[in-house]
Amino acid sequence: MKKIAIVGISGYSGLELLRLLHGHSEVEIDGVYGTSNIGTSLTSIFPKLAFFPEYASLTIKAFSASEIMATSDLVFFATPAGIASELARELILADFPVIDLSGDFRLQDVNQYEKWYKKSAIHSDLLSKADYLLADFDTPQQNYISNPGCYATGTLLSLAPLYQSKVDLIAYDSVIVDAKSGLSGAGKKLTDSSHFVNVNENVSMYKLNQHQHIPEIFNKLKSWQNQTLPIQFTTSLIPVNRGIFVSSYAKLAKNITFEQVVSAYHELYDDKYFVRVFDQGHLPDLHQVVGTNFTDIGLDYNPLTNTLTVVTVIDNLVKGAAGQAIQNMNHFFGFDEKAGLDLVPIF
Amino acid sequence: MKKIAIVGISGYSGLELLRLLHGHSEVEIDGVYGTSNIGTSLTSIFPKLAFFPEYASLTIKAFSASEIMATSDLVFFATPAGIASELARELILADFPVIDLSGDFRLQDVNQYEKWYKKSAIHSDLLSKADYLLADFDTPQQNYISNPGCYATGTLLSLAPLYQSKVDLIAYDSVIVDAKSGLSGAGKKLTDSSHFVNVNENVSMYKLNQHQHIPEIFNKLKSWQNQTLPIQFTTSLIPVNRGIFVSSYAKLAKNITFEQVVSAYHELYDDKYFVRVFDQGHLPDLHQVVGTNFTDIGLDYNPLTNTLTVVTVIDNLVKGAAGQAIQNMNHFFGFDEKAGLDLVPIF
Amino acid sequence: MKKIAIVGISGYSGLELLRLLHGHSEVEIDGVYGTSNIGTSLTSIFPKLAFFPEYASLTIKAFSASEIMATSDLVFFATPAGIASELARELILADFPVIDLSGDFRLQDVNQYEKWYKKSAIHSDLLSKADYLLADFDTPQQNYISNPGCYATGTLLSLAPLYQSKVDLIAYDSVIVDAKSGLSGAGKKLTDSSHFVNVNENVSMYKLNQHQHIPEIFNKLKSWQNQTLPIQFTTSLIPVNRGIFVSSYAKLAKNITFEQVVSAYHELYDDKYFVRVFDQGHLPDLHQVVGTNFTDIGLDYNPLTNTLTVVTVIDNLVKGAAGQAIQNMNHFFGFDEKAGLDLVPIF
Amino acid sequence: MKKIAIVGISGYSGLELLRLLHGHSEVEIDGVYGTSNIGTSLTSIFPKLAFFPEYASLTIKAFSASEIMATSDLVFFATPAGIASELARELILADFPVIDLSGDFRLQDVNQYEKWYKKSAIHSDLLSKADYLLADFDTPQQNYISNPGCYATGTLLSLAPLYQSKVDLIAYDSVIVDAKSGLSGAGKKLTDSSHFVNVNENVSMYKLNQHQHIPEIFNKLKSWQNQTLPIQFTTSLIPVNRGIFVSSYAKLAKNITFEQVVSAYHELYDDKYFVRVFDQGHLPDLHQVVGTNFTDIGLDYNPLTNTLTVVTVIDNLVKGAAGQAIQNMNHFFGFDEKAGLDLVPIF
């Protein structure tokens, strides 16, 4: 039984880790840490956890790298931007296992980080200790795992077969990704844009051409396909609690048929448990994946415009955050990949 | 005071006509007609109208062209596909004023109609008597007005300045329109896809590459710009009652700047009361327009991908149906364009 | 044309006044005042008003009683609790017409106010200058009109025929009111309980036995019926933007039949335009009234428990706030009661 | 490993059984049966199950009591009203284990059944073979288990300590239960009242004084407390997918204090894992229980009206249907009560 610490428990990703780890038989949570609310019991923040024995006794402790290293086997950071890079230094230097759900280590290039996050980056020596692990493709090489962003996960899984293909399947300058997300993706912050009345019965586009997941998507695509060009990526808020719906469009490359594209998706994904490619004529909706770690993908082609459409859905808090983090942990410890994640969708 | 008849009152467009015409001081409804529920009082179908004096006495009468022509000045068809083309023949031959909210006369080409609607078209002699009137641009020439579809309206208003421009502003083969609609756009039919549990907390894409508004969009763009190529157009259902949110993408043509595009939008729309172009840095959301006849438009440009983004919102039942029909009627009778339509959005 | 000032424009009630007064032909808004955001244009707070000529030029001015009295004919206070009682003194002393949508003058008893609002009350000499006007029953006697609370309005209209009856129709110790409200009733404040994710797919009961509308309900019932006893009143939040749904229960008094109760409702309400009593077997839902000033009422009786059920629905922002305020204004100025309020419900 | 059959798989309760049993380590589903869609694969009805190995091979078989008895250890009926009573006769005569989620065997009195269900009842000899088992209180005595209705479960758990108490805690003629339910409680049927546009942004009361759960509630209360009188019970639909929110009101009996009532709740429930009584000052909301088998309860008292308020929340598909059925099955087979049901709530 591995012992797990969590830093930053009060946000949605932290809560989702607690929900999922409750069903994981190979780990136990032995400490929750933070930088505020020290001494507060976990169950006073989340009354719905009050009756689970393993959570009843936990209180938030002041972050201490040495305590974590003394008592735990691995720590999750589920902290807002800028916190992990402040707190993790000691853990990195000691090569202690970390899975970081924040964006702090997703960009290895200091300038790129500072441009998109508008914050100072951590020193590049430390950045280079982190592996950006898209769990369905990558396995841990180092002890610091940077978990991908929710939009990045949905988008990369939507496009991977196109960019990992040996032949050029699409025109790289034609890619447009129109992604829609439920509100939990925007976190628990109290802002006008998270007030119920403003969100309900509404749709809005935000951070147009400025979303911080754009560079991590580009970097990963580039690592797969050297000819990668910038993609057009937009994000809209829709009035649901959970779920990301990614509509991707691309022109097929010359002489490429839709059947070749379909084959590429099946070839890449058919042996991956957590990615499910639908038969032609069927497209997934959010209900297919809510509450689970699945990524569901449907495909169609329009000969009039020579355009491929890829519809991809994930649960932003599971595959887009805590679920992928646990999948990465399962790989790290050599557990069954499905441990704690073998869940049927719930509507 | 003009007298108005309505055929097909029981759907959302019919109800919306009743809601809006209640506030129109120059017309009165003198008859509602249908092909079913004959003899049923209007207020038993819509209890919420029971206490409005002008609706209290109306009952659905069996459709009769001769009765309508004898007692009314104009008739709205708010009927499902295939009904207006069956019933309207006598009215057309007599050159009686009709505003048809259905799709029956939107496509003048019989083959195109039959391909996309999968129904027999009316004879092309009759089709040619109909004007497809996008109310912010077109004025009635003939007495049969074909009112545009909801998606078509949002999409055409989103793209008009790009296609009416004398210089080529965009690459015509690069246009992608990702449109999202609330449920009332799908009508009152009882289907699995309109059941609350299936729609709520969900998003789904439907009729991909097969939506019947695609040809009317193409035809209108082509009438503006001869180089028009097919556009990629997709529709997703979002869990709101009302509203269409259109995200349009296009590559700018060579040597065209974003400022030129912005100017084109202002030039075309600044004197149109019902189309509002937002200042740069601001994008509209559905709440801007719900309950009103406005079309709100925001613009942005991404130099990395050379892509223009146009965000356009309308209320699908007002601008996308009954409101535009009344705007067309106002033009037809020479009323103030805003009569019955001077409404502040309601959230 | 009467000139209207509004103090406190940035909340939902203020915005709703603007929406409704736009359609009122006998008044014009000549000034908006506040205690913060001075100098801010109205349309930068509410972009959706940006294109309405009468709002385009308004900016928020620092509150000035003397300026209001010099230029306007009546002022609405749509301010949070505690502001009107601070600002209105000069207006009251000058006997200037005020319609106050806040709770500051709803309770004439200083002790009662301080107990329920947990704030200092204004001096009782000033309190006594205010009339609490339930617009369907009361007409202005003095120049300071205290507009009822949203829950109070729904509850009082639900119960009025039972408490205004000359014979005792119910057991006064048996009344239970279970009221449910949409989120706009809780205002624009950013709190955990207004965050979309917490409200959506949820129901919660709040301020149980402590809601500040309880005493104003009791006082009004007592003014109608001297035997009035405290009623049990609870409020739950439901995930909709607008609407209050009031379920009231009471045991019938000895020898009273359901038919007598139904008659009492019709007798009291049949000549009131804005209150609509449904036929037996029909109960109203929120969609009957959203966007309008109507109060819709349905009745049923259970002989097994001798219990009357009264279902009452209003739009909390219209009948429960801005609409009733305008109805009161219409009475005050002697306008047609329906001016600005003759609206068909919108779903 | 016990083998389980399910009859009537296509509704929400059937799907929820599949979701929950996927996580149950002591049983496996070895057959799904129906009276329609024979031969249809399970995964074509529920695409979201397509990738779960144990469901991939199941197709709906024509109901056969003898096949079920030959191959399975227990059968769940998740059928609409009237089906189980038709099909189960042979199973009952053979004393084969059945857990029936429908209402067919909940009322042992033939006349009562026919009055409330408006259908013919099964013969009373067979009815008497069924145990109505509220899983937190009752354990199986016979082999036919009738699983309580969703509203009945929430209401009975809300009131149990008041009716199981040896001293009279409340006035039995004063009880009013105002229950609200999400839409999945109304099933998958396509009706106007389940159409998204009619439900969304709405609340409505239905089956007032006619709900078929009223008699099963009464019978169970009566079995606990002989002085039980009819209770006033109403049901409203709220726009959420899942959850029942029960607001119960009762006058305290003479000389009874609120503290005594609180003690009664703790005494009855503190050792029941699936019922959680909240500390005073805290009330549960739906998010506390969604996706789980918990029943959460909060209490308050109003001395002005001598009224106790009990707020009780359950997930209608889990505790109100499939979860309680599994809890009953766990008792029947002697499994750990929590098997398959040890879930953290999901928002």
Image (cartoon, coloured by chain):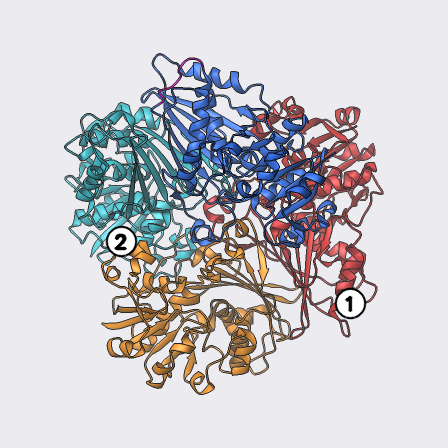
Chain colours: A red, B orange, C cyan, D blue
Q: Residue furthest right?
A: A141
Callout 2: residue from which chain? C
Residue B154 magenta: no
Residue at 67% over, 42% down: D66
Q: Kindly state the secondary structure of the residue where label 1 is placed.
A: helix
Using the rendered view, name the quadrant where residue C79 is placed.
top left
Count neighbours of disc 2 (C-alpha within 10 A) and say few if under 14, some if 14 to 19, many if 20 or more.
Answer: many
Q: Position of residue C187 (x, y in %)?
A: 40, 41
In this rendering, the label closer to the viewer, 1 or 2: 1
Q: Position of residue A20 (x, y in %)?
A: 68, 36
Quadrant including the C terminus of chain C: bottom left
Q: Kindly state the secondary structure of the residue where label 2 is placed.
A: loop
The dot on residue C341 is 2
Count neighbours of disc 1 (C-alpha within 10 A) and say few if under 14, some if 14 to 19, many if 20 or more.
Answer: few
Magenta region, residue range: D166-172
Q: Position of residue A79 (x, y in %)?
A: 66, 37
User: How much space separates mark 1 and mark 2, taking CA atoms?
Assistant: 62 Å
Residue hosting label 1: A260
Q: Position of residue D175 (x, y in %)?
A: 37, 26
Indicate whether A124 appears above or below C230: below
Instruction: State left or right for residue D259 relative to residue D72.
Output: left
Residue D169 magenta: yes
